[in-house]
Amino acid sequence: AIRDHFAARGDAESWSLLTPFTEEPAKLLGIIVVLLLAATRPRSALDGLVTGSFVGLGFEVVENVARSINNAITSYPPGQRDNLGSLAVDLLHEVVRGSWSGHIVITGIAGFGVGYAMTARERSAVRRWAVAVSLVALAVAGHLLWNSHRFGAFYVLGQVALFVFFLWLIRVGRRREAEIYLPYLRYVMPSVIDAGNRRSRTRRRATAELAAAISTGDAQRAHRCVQQLAGDGSGQIQPRRVKPT
């Protein structure tokens, strides 16, 4: 009804500029529900980003499939064009366009903010919620830009900037996960962690990978990372001897 109202005024595109203020709160609620109902509590802001990206992916799939089917039915009546071909082209276009921008990215950014507010307990509540509100506001602004299509080069540059910022948040999240788990690893294998603290890009990456593997319970991946960290030529790890008590 609201869209029809704008269409009657000859400004149907203005309706698309209102959708971020309804869709983003709905997706935000989905992120919060998933994080609260998870079997294990979120451990870092990266958990929020991953959850947000998957919520955005689900929203993207439903929205794009519905839009593509509607376009195939209404824009190309039977006998004028291959409706199935039109549907396939529309879906391919939306998948390519939405794989690096759109709901996946902007909802992931909002999810990072929610995850940060829930997990960064060493920070003050004011800072945590300031970061969360800022990132959610950025997601709404990104959605407005996504729906506008009126700003030419600014539109493209804005989408690229959001994607780069999304990748940067992933990097920050991985670093925070390493900060969370490395202190515990020191009690298990201090020599390995000390080796990982050397200013070597490869070792720093392996250390972050090890923390991520432990957080997800991926034993094989963790073993490979430990082998890489402990391998100073031999690539072998000597098991620690534990004296019986």
Image (spheres, rainbow, N blue to C red):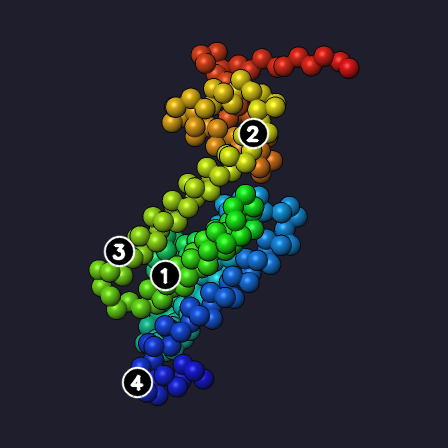
Residue type, mark 3 in image? Leu
* Label drawn at residue 10: 4
Instruction: Report crowding for label 1: few under 14, some 14 to 19, many 20 or more residues within 10 A (C-alpha).
Output: many
* Label drawn at residue 142: 1
Between 149 and 194, the one lying in front of the other is: 194
Q: Which residue is mark 3?
A: 157
- Gap in angstroms between the C-alphas marked 2 and 4: 61 Å
* Label drawn at residue 183: 2
Q: Secondary structure at mark 2?
A: helix
Q: Position of residue 160 (x, y in %)?
A: 30, 53
- Corner quadrant of residue 232: top left
42 up-or-down from 81: above or below: above
Of callouts 4 and 3, the N-terminal one:
4
- Gap in angstroms between the C-alphas marked 1 and 2: 37 Å
Q: State which quarter of the image contains the N terminus.
A: bottom left
Residue 66 visible to an observer of this rendering? no
Mark 4 or mark 3, whichever is nearer to me: 3
Between 51 and 243, the one lying in front of the other is: 243
Residue type, mark 4 in image? Gly
- Gap in angstroms between the C-alphas marked 1 and 4: 25 Å
Q: Secondary structure at mark 3?
A: helix
26 up-or-down from 162: above or below: below
